[in-house]
C-alpha cells in the first residue's frame, strides 16, 4: 500500500513507509541550512508546512534555527489566536472499560481501581459543581464498555448536562471524547448537539499500536484511525486529534499526526479543529519507567512549536498532566486551550475530600480554576469561556475560513472579553476580578472593527448590570 493522503484507508493516509522516508530525509538534511531557511520562509506565510518539512525542522539541532522556530511559532499563534486562551474541564462519566491498553489504568485487568459510573443525578451534581467554578465548556470522557457505557448512556448524559441551569451557570458546549464508533452513532452525537468529537490516536505506529492495545475493540488499528472520517461522514464538523507522546518515538508521532491533519484537509476540506499533545504520565497500575520513549521538556516545547507552524489554524490543547511551569512555556508557543481545576476521577468534582482512586492519570497542575484564570491574566493572556462559534453555527469549514482570513478576531476578541466579564462578575475572587477588569479595559480597545468594539463595550456594561450571554 502506497502513501495517499486522500485515501480512506488508514495504512495509506498514515503510511509507515512514507513516515520512515520522511524521517530519513530529515536526518540527511538536518544541517542543510539553505533548505531549512527555505522551509522557515514558507512557514512565515502562515499557511502551514508539510509533514516532511516539519520532520526536518524537528531534526535540526542548530540553536539559532531552533530559536527562529520558536519565535515563528509565537508570531503565528499571535496572528490566529491572539492572547486568548479557551478554558474547559474534563468530566469523567465512567471508568468501566473492556480494552487492555497497557498505558491506561482503566484497562480491564486492573483490579486495584474502583469501577464507577455516574448516574444522571450524579452527573447533575458534578455539572453544578463545575458551573459553580465558572466553567461553560466540558469535555466528557468515558471508558469503552458497550454494556456499562452504551451510546444511549452518553446521549442521555449530554442531554442532562445541557439541561442544567444553576444560578447564572450553564454548560454551553459539550465536547465528547469516547471510543471510535459507527457513522450512525456519530450522527446521534451530532443530533445531541456536541461541539468537538475528540479521539486520541495514542500512537500512529501500527505495530506499536497493536502491542499497546493487545485486547478489546481498540486493538483494531484501522477502525480507530479512520474514526474521524466516519465522524465527519456522520455530520460532525469539528474533530480533535492527538497522540500520547512517550508511547512511541516522538519523531514518528509528529509526522503521523501532521499526516492525519493533511488527510482531513485533503478529504473533507477542513483539518482538525484541535490537536492535543498529552505526554505519558504516572497513574494507578501504570509506571512510566516502563515506557522508554518519554519526551524531555525541551523537545516537547519544540514539538508544540512545530505543530503550531505546520497547522497554524488548529486549536492546541494542553491538559493538567503538565506542570504549571511547562504549561506556561508552551502557551506562547502554540497552546490555545487549557483545562483548569480539573479532576480526572469519576465523580471527582463533588467529592469533599479529593479521591483519585478512580483517576485516569495523575494531575500535575492542581490549582483551582480561579487560580489558573488569575495566573493567565497576570501573564497578559485572556481566559475565554466563549462558545459563540459553536452556538452560531460557525463550525467546520465556516469557522476555518473566518480563522484563516483573520476576520475571526472581530468575533473572538469581544466574545472572549465578554465571557471573561461574566466569570469575573459571578465567580472570581476579589483580586482576580480586579486584575480582570483592568485587562478587559485594555484589551477591548484592540478590537479592530469600530462598530463591533463599540457594541462590545455596551454589552460589557450590561454584563456589569446583571445581564448575561451576549455574543457576536
Image (cartoon, rainbow, N blue to C red):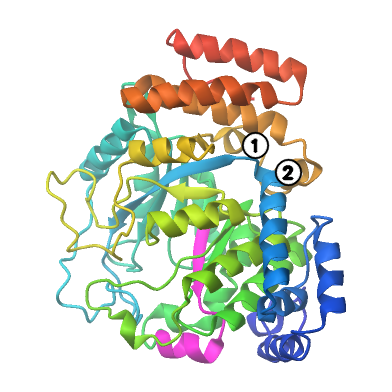
Of the pair 259 and 394, the residue shown nearer to us = 259
Residue 233: mark? none
Q: Which residues are magenta?
A: 198-212
Q: Which residue, given by chain and number where applicable, does mark 1 sit on?
A: 393
Q: Which residue, given by chain and number where applicable, does mark 2 sit on?
A: 403
Q: Is residue 278 left or right of residue 235?
A: left
Residue 44 in the image, given as x and y percentages of width and height: 81, 57
Label 1 crowd (10 A; few <14 / some 14-19 / many >=20): few
Q: Is residue 282 above or below residue 401?
A: below
Label 2 crowd (10 A; few <14 / some 14-19 / many >=20): some
Residue 297 in the image, given as x and y percentages of width and height: 48, 70
Locate residue 292: give its quadrant.
bottom left
Q: Is residue 393 left or right of residue 282?
A: right
Mark with earlier residue (1, 2): 1
Res. 21 in view: yes
Q: Is residue 100 left or right of residue 77?
A: left
Classify the position of the N terminus by image quarter. Answer: bottom right
Amino acid at each position: 500500500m502506497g502513501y495517499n493522503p486522500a485515501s480512506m484507508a488508514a495504512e495509506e493516509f498514515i503510511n509507515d513507509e512514507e513516515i520512515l522516508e520522511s524521517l530519513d530525509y530529515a536526518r540527511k538534511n538536518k544541517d542543510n541550512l539553505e533548505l531549512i531557511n527555505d522551509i522557515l520562509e514558507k512557514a512565515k506565510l502562515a499557511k502551514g508546512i508539510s509533514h516532511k518539512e516539519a520532520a526536518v525542522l524537528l531534526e535540526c539541532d542548530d540553536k539559532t534555527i531552533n530559536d527562529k522556530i520558536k519565535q515563528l511559532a509565537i508570531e503565528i499563534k499571535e496572528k490566529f489566536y491572539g492572547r486568548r486562551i479557551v478554558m474547559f474541564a474534563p468530566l469523567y462519566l465512567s471508568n468501566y472499560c473492556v480494552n487492555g491498553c497497557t498505558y491506561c489504568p482503566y484497562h480491564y485487568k486492573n483490579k486495584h481501581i474502583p469501577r464507577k459510573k455516574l448516574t444522571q443525578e450524579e452527573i447533575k451534581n458534578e455539572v453544578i459543581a463545575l458551573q459553580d467554578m465558572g466553567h461553560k465548556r466540558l469535555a466528557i470522557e468515558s471508558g469503552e464498555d458497550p454494556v456499562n457505557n452504551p451510546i444511549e448512556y452518553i446521549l442521555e448524559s449530554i442531554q442532562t448536562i445541557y439541561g442544567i441551569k444553576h444560578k447564572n451557570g450553564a454548560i454551553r458546549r459539550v465536547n465528547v471524547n469516547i471510543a471510535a464508533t459507527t457513522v450512525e452513532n456519530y450522527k446521534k452525537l451530532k443530533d445531541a448537539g456536541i461541539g468537538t468529537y475528540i479521539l486520541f490516536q495514542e500512537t500512529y505506529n501500527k505495530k506499536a499500536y497493536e502491542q499497546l492495545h493487545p485486547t478489546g475493540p481498540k486493538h483494531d488499528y484501522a477502525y480507530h484511525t479512520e474514526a474521524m472520517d466516519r465522524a465527519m461522514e456522520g455530520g460532525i464538523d469539528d474533530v480533535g486529534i492527538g497522540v500520547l507522546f512517550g508511547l512511541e518515538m516522538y519523531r514518528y508521532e509528529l509526522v503521523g499526526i501532521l499526516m492525519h491533519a493533511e488527510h482531513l484537509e485533503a478529504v473533507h476540506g477542513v483539518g482538525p479543529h484541535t490537536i492535543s499533545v498529552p505526554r505519558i504520565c504516572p497513574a494507578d497500575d501504570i509506571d512510566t519507567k516502563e515506557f522508554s520513549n518519554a519526551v524531555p521538556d525541551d523537545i516537547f516545547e519544540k514539538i508544540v512549536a512545530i505543530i503550531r507552524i505546520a497547522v497554524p489554524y488548529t486549536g492546541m490543547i494542553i491538559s493538567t498532566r503538565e506542570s504549571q511551569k511547562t504549561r506556561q512555556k508552551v502557551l506562547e508557543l502554540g497552546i490555545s486551550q487549557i483545562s483548569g481545576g480539573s479532576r480526572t476521577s469519576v465523580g471527582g468534582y463533588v467529592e469533599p475530600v479529593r479521591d483519585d482512586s478512580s483517576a485516569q492519570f495523575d494531575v500535575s497542575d492542581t490549582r483551582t480554576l480561579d487560580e489558573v484564570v488569575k495566573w493567565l491574566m497576570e501573564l497578559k493572556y485572556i481566559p475565554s469561556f466563549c462558545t459563540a462559534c459553536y452556538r452560531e453555527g460557525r463550525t467546520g469549514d465556516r469557522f476555518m475560513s473566518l480563522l484563516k482570513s483573520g476576520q475571526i478576531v472581530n468575533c473572538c476578541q469581544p466574545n472572549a472579553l465578554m465571557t471573561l466579564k461574566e466569570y469575573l462578575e459571578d465567580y472570581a475572587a476579589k483580586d482576580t476580578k480586579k486584575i480582570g477588569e483592568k485587562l478587559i479595559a485594555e484589551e477591548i480597545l484592540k478590537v479592530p472593527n469600530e462598530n463591533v468594539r463599540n457594541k462590545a463595550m455596551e454589552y460589557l456594561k450590561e454584563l456589569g448590570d446583571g445581564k448575561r450571554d451576549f455574543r457576536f
